[in-house]
Image (cartoon, rainbow, N blue to C red):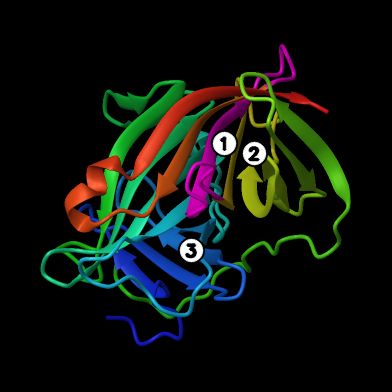
Amino acid sequence: MSTAANAIDGVWYNVYGSKMTLTSNPATGLIIGTYSSTTGSSGRYTVLGYTRSSSTGPVAGANGFSVSLNIGWKSLDGGQGDPSWSCVSGLAGQFVVDAGGNPVLNLIHQFVAPNDVPLGGTQQFQTGISSDKLVYTRTPPAGAVAETGGSGAAMPQLPQEAVAAQSWTCVEDPGISFTQYEPYEGAFSGQYVMHGYSGPLAGQYDAAFPGDGAFYQSYCLSTLSQDPQTGAPMCVALAGWINPASGKLEVLEMRSVGTTWDARYAGVRTRGLTFTPG
């Protein structure tokens, strides 16, 4: 287990050896961290997200804590840019304890490629959204990203001033809307309203668009909300892009709720949504 103040804090590894380092605010549930990947990218990347506001973690046999994360794939360490820098990821799932009593992050991952992204050889991410399941534990597998003391470039900070920059309303579900505040280096905060419940949000987008040649402007956000039926804590992730032809935000919505380890397959619900400005 992590020795950090909050149970979700510290270093997590997935089966590919990628490393995610998280720090959370127990009062608000806000998560800020970094990601180091072994799958087609190098360097460190910004992680933002939300989880249930708590200084403790889930326990064996009880429901997990819902989690929503997003990653902006522009390297914090600088260097030569490539098509992957236009991409973002949205992740949703839960922080749960497995049958052996071990803490696990069980997440559904949506990788948003607003342009084709070469992976080496003949492989590439084609323009679109690629989905997979990622499981993170505290134990690094063989070949994992090594621990380093390097700091690299500073991670972007969320805006401190609540200056409204853009509001969006959902076409398919008009009870959902949100306002993002003035962004800073591709990161933004704001307020997310779901059927009368208002919660904070944190997100990222491709700040270099359209100069980077991407077809769409990638966009993702995470918010802490509540289940409309039960009132239980629920985290929501949106991952997709702004279509320059229509000006609309086209995303996959992922809603994550806490379940027991045995019922973890039912922890995330996904659907496609469209948002219009205003």
Lower position in the chain sequence, tag 2 or tag 3: 3
Numbered tag placed on residue 206 in the rendering: 2
**Residue that badge 1 annotates:** 86
Residue 193, picture quadrant? top right
Q: Are marks 2 and 3 in contact (CB under 8 Å)?
A: no
- Tell me if residue 72 can be seen: no
- In the image, which residues are magenta? 226-248
**Residue that badge 3 annotates:** 34
The residue lying furthest to the front in this view is: 230
240 on left or right of 16 = right
Instruction: Find numbered disc 3 in the image and state the secondary structure of the residue it sits on.
Output: strand
Residue 56, compared with residue 66, is above or below; it is: below
Q: Residue at x 33, y 61 (%)?
A: 64
Dot in front, 1 or 3: 3
Q: Position of residue 112 (x, y in %)?
A: 48, 32
Measure the C-alpha gap from mark 1 to mark 3. Answer: 17 Å
Lower position in the chain sequence, tag 1 or tag 3: 3
Badge 1 amino acid: Ser
Badge 2 amino acid: Asp
Q: Nearer the viewer, residue 257 or 123?
A: 257
Residue 257, compared with residue 149, is above or below; it is: above
Measure the C-alpha gap from mark 2 to mark 3. Answer: 17 Å
Instruction: Find numbered disc 1 in the image and state the secondary structure of the residue it sits on.
Output: helix
Residue 275, compared with residue 136, is above or below; it is: above
Q: Residue at x 45, y 86 (%)?
A: 5
Lower position in the chain sequence, tag 2 or tag 1: 1
Measure the C-alpha gap from mark 2 to mark 1. Answer: 5 Å
16 on left or right of 118 = left
